[in-house]
Image (cartoon, helix red, strand yellow):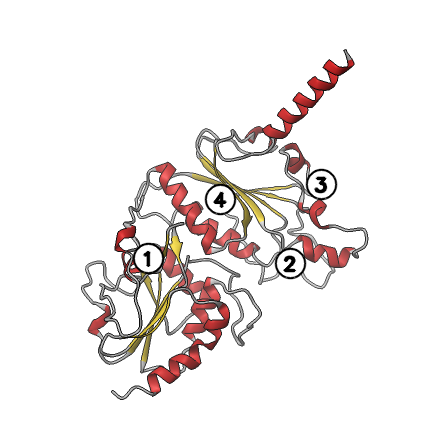
Amino acid sequence: MLRICTLLFVVFSLSFVKAQNLNVGDQFPINKIENLDQSSHLKIIIFTPSLYKTNDYASMLTTSLYYYFVQGLAFTSKNSPKIDVIYVVNEEDKWGKEVKQSFTFNDSSNQNKLNGAQVIYDDYGKVYQSLGLKPFKQNSISTIIPVSLSANKILVESSILFLLDKDNKIILRDNDYRAQGEHLKPLEKWVKKISKTDEIDVDLKTNRILKVGDKAPDFILNGPNYENNSSIKLLDDTSNFKVLTFYPAAFSGQILPDFTSIDKKAMMTCAAQIQLIDHNPLLGKVKSYAISSSTNPLLERWKSALRTTNITYLNDYNYEISLAYNSYNRLGYNNRATYVIDKDGIIVYANPNLTFEEEAKFPAILEELVLNNKN
């Protein structure tokens, strides 16, 4: 009898563990998130350590999801899908409280956009545990490390993101989500696929490898600076060198970063990539373009957030330009390809996927290419 009870307990325990895995294809137990407004919409649920400024990606996380999915700026269709964005935060709600620490939670650098989203503060991790997720505090706190130091470690862990369909079935689970473009664009791709809205058919056969000396593929310039029926092409301009920099996504990386200096040890982000090329000392000789698959309204807000002045944002909605320049990644975003094109439309610099270290050297490379040109 004891063996039977033990066996039943083991089977029950294994079933419970399996039920709590929350894998793609599983039914998400949405009712375990207390105080959550229920709906039949698509849902993006983010389990995050904190929404405060000590979490360096919190502002970009909330801003990107707000513009992309709450406001629906990731869609060109008038009937964009209804999406619930839900944050389950492993931290107490400190907004509005007087905090006598070295930082304040209502500081201007903490620019979360939570309008239209639901926020569940789960300081003790009860919701996490009910779902079989380990609270972030349990992941990081050590009795050896002082609390003041361990807190910083807690707040920089990656969030866990789930995408649910209208029936709360798990379509996507991302355990390393911190608003990276390489994660944001696949999320957008899945949302469009399951909602059957603005799906993009990418023909990988048109992907083209380019090298120095090749004629640059020409294309019509499309973006916030151009009319919808514009026929202006890239190579129409024969008075400037041109820099094309491809990047994964608008609103990726830390929001409103300080680029008074270049931190070569920092991780490369879309924001850093664009800001670096925007600070171009060769004005009047070089025209710079930042290219992503987006929408013009989204790019308008991205430009405003980054406060750029010299770079022109181009919208490569269906990835035709990206494929022509060997930038498209089959996971659904642009690699960080960068090209320099001379006045005759010839490629004089080609890098299909820049690292941050290479990009930090790029201004000097560009200057040498331009100043040594005989034309």
Q: Label for residue 116? A: 4
Query: Residue at the location (49% across, 55% down)?
Result: 180
Amino acid on which disc 2 is placed: Thr
Image side of residue 207 versus residue 74, left or right = left
Q: Where is residue 164 drawn, in percent x and y?
A: 47, 36
Mark 2 or mark 1, which has the lower sequence index?
2
Q: CA distance from mark 1 to mark 3?
A: 42 Å
Q: Residues within 10 Å of mark 3 (few under 14, many from 20)?
A: some
Q: CA distance from mark 2 to mark 1?
A: 32 Å
Q: Name the mark nearer the viewer: 4 or 1.
A: 1
The answer to whether the residues at label 2 and label 1 have Cβ atoms under 8 Å apart is no
Query: Residue at the location (53% across, 76% down)?
Result: 260
Say which residue label 1 marks. 296
Q: Where is residue 339 drawn, in percent x and y?
A: 34, 70
Say which residue label 2 marks. 54
Amino acid on which disc 3 is placed: Tyr
Amino acid on which disc 4 is placed: Gly
